[in-house]
Amino acid sequence: MTCDEFEAMGLDAGREASLSKAQCDAAAAHAASCPRCGALQGSWEAARLELRSLAQVTATKDAPARVEMRLRQQFRTQYHTPRAHRMAIVGAWSLAAAAVLVGAVSWVRWQSSKNDAARKTNTPVANQGSSQQNNFADSGILVADNELSDFTFLPGVLPADADDGAILRVRIQRGALGAFGLPVNEDRAGEWIQVDLLVGDDGLPQAVRLQE
Amino acid sequence: MLLRRAGKGDEEAFTLLYRRHQGPLYRFALRMSGNAWAAEEIVQDVFMTLMRDPKKYDAARGTLGAFLYGVTRNRTLKHLERLPREVSLEEKSENGTSTGIVLKDAFTPALHAEKRERMEHVWAAVLDLPAEFREAVVLCELEERSYEEAAQMIGCPIGTIRSRLHRGRALLMARLEMLRDTPRRAGAAR
């Protein structure tokens, strides 16, 4: 082995597995025979020992605990804050949607009840048998007393014709009774009164009953 | 697996990942920079990068350890470029305690001082090496990695490692000789 070869690989003898036993032996023989390379090897061995000591001193060094703390804090900030923020946004939107829904339903119900109340006051009421009651109830007509004896039949109508009729409660001016052929007090003709009309199958009134 | 869990916000998985890898990365940064604060910052920066963008790691290209080592190496080299002459053998924290290298196995104050001085010389000699030679010395001599392993970590052929180590050793020995001679000469002058 020459001095150049020793410089290139001799210092690795004993540590590098890529060197064969023959190469290691040749390096050792050269170091023993060449004072310069022997001194080089000695110098390197001393340096290596010191490097080993340095390695031992730093071998157990770990990053300080504060690094882990900082990283965990950052981790929480990165992952948990957006999640909480997202949940808060979703919650707020859900609440808003629920409020709008409740408001809409309440408004619809209020409108519906308002219409019903208006119908109760303005719309006549019918009542005739249970099957017809349902039909009238669907159309918002209230059922009235079905006792026909209180009705005054309009001129030209026979009581037998009124058997299948429906009773409607309406609010009319007293003067309108004249149209049915009934006597009207002219002084009170403009007065609003509530009457029950017995309406036949053809939709024409057949009898009228004045409310108390 | 841990990385995937960490990517979904599992803090415990991230902590486990950190604890598993921080030691070697910190030691490498410390040995390369000679500065405990810098090593701390580098390790923190590496894990911040992993936390912010875990998809940067591609399992098909190697292990997570190798990836983290690569990031640490880049950060360390950048740090050395920024502060090329920053050599800190031992730093004092705010409360006066040492944050750098501390020798704990000294028997007597005299031995402690001598050993400490010698260690400071070695440390200074290592830190005085150019970064590429220093890296080869740190990996092959301090961390006792094989040439093949070091070549894989750095991403260069084994021959390059050999030649860097060869040059690094020569510079290191010359520097150590010089440092050894300096106190002798100072003592003779007295």
Image: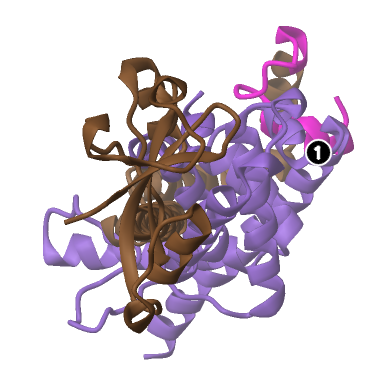
Residue located 38% across and 62% down the image: A183
Q: Is residue A24 above or below residue B69?
A: above
Q: Chain under label 1?
A: B
Q: Residue A208: where, in percent of width, then height?
A: 36, 46
Q: How many marks?
A: 1
Q: Colour of chain B?
A: purple
Residue type pointed to by label 1: Gly
Q: Is residue A124 magenta?
A: no
Q: Quadrant of residue A195?
A: bottom left
Callout 1: helix, strand or loop? loop
Farthest residue, direction left: B108
Alpha-carbon neighbours of circle 1 within 10 Å: few (<14), some, or many (≥20)? few
Q: Quadrant of residue B111?
A: bottom left
Residue located 51% across and 51% down the image: B47
- Residue designated by label 1: B155
Q: Quadrant of the C terminus of chain B?
A: bottom left
Q: Residue A174: where, in percent of width, then height?
A: 38, 68
In this picture, residue B98 sits left or right of residue B100:
left
Residue located 61% across and 24% down the image: A15
Q: Colour of chain A?
A: brown
Q: Residue B131: where, in percent of width, then height?
A: 71, 61
Q: Is residue A118 above or below residue B83?
A: above
Magenta stretch in the rendered image: A1-23
